[in-house]
Amino acid sequence: MDKNVVVTGGNQGVGLGLVKELLKNDQVGKVLATTRSPSTSHELLLIIDSRLEVVEMDADSDESINSAVQQISKAVGSYGIDFLINNAGVLHPVDINAPINRKEAMKNFEVNCVATMAVTYAFKELLKAGAKKSGHSQVVNISSLLGSISRTWGSVPPRQGRAEYVHEDDRN
């Protein structure tokens, strides 16, 4: 039975790479890639594959999450989803030499932690349906060492924190 996979933040970086790799696998039924702004997700929209569906979802908005769940539910029907890959995230720059900007720090926390929990909860019924079909479903949370509480890196340029530092740690 083909697997249905949701990839949040599927429009760039690691998420886009996952979407492309998943579509190479003939055991994957549907890949449902979420993005805050489908119209500006140019590289994602260039992928021609009938199994790909681009879904608008802002992980920071419960209304947007619920709308995405409804759209995805219609796309997968009673089969549900087999994998939820929580990849969506943000990195608002933090200057470690300046006083903490609580608003920016909380925005990072809200999107990268709380939103991941909210998305997972919202997809719970679709995950249960997927588990009925195949015996199990899985939630994969993508993070990086930049998300570590015990390892602090200071300021890192945008788009370099996710894959590069994880890869660097894998070599040690």
Image (cartoon, rainbow, N blue to C red):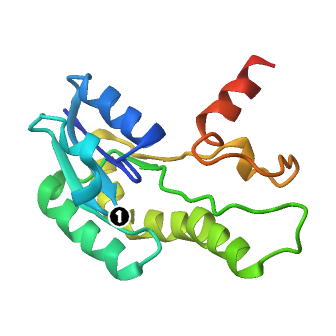
The residue positioned 57% from the left and 44% from the top of the image is 159
User: Along the line of sight, which residue is nearer the eye, 141 or 77?
Assistant: 141
The residue positioned 59% from the left and 71% from the top of the image is 114
Give the quadrant of residue 50. Answer: top left
Across and down, in percent, residue 45 comes to 19, 45
The residue positioned 34% from the left and 82% from the top of the image is 63
User: Along the line of sight, which residue is nearer the eye, 92 or 119?
Assistant: 92
Q: Is residue 48 left or right of residue 139?
A: left
Residue 26 visible in image: yes
Residue 133 visible in image: no
Furthest residue toward top: 171
Q: Is residue 141 left or right of residue 69?
A: right
Across and down, in percent, residue 152 comes to 86, 49
Give the amino acid at mark 1.
Answer: Arg
Which SS class for mark 1?
loop
Q: Is residue 18 left or right of residue 156?
A: left
Picture quarter with the N terminus: top left
Q: Which residue is mark 1?
A: 36
Above or below: residue 121 compared with residue 96: below
Across and down, in percent, residue 94 comes to 75, 63
**How many labels, in total?**
1
Above or below: residue 142 compared with residue 61: above
Above or below: residue 11 compared with residue 55: above
The residue positioned 78% from the left and 50% from the top of the image is 148
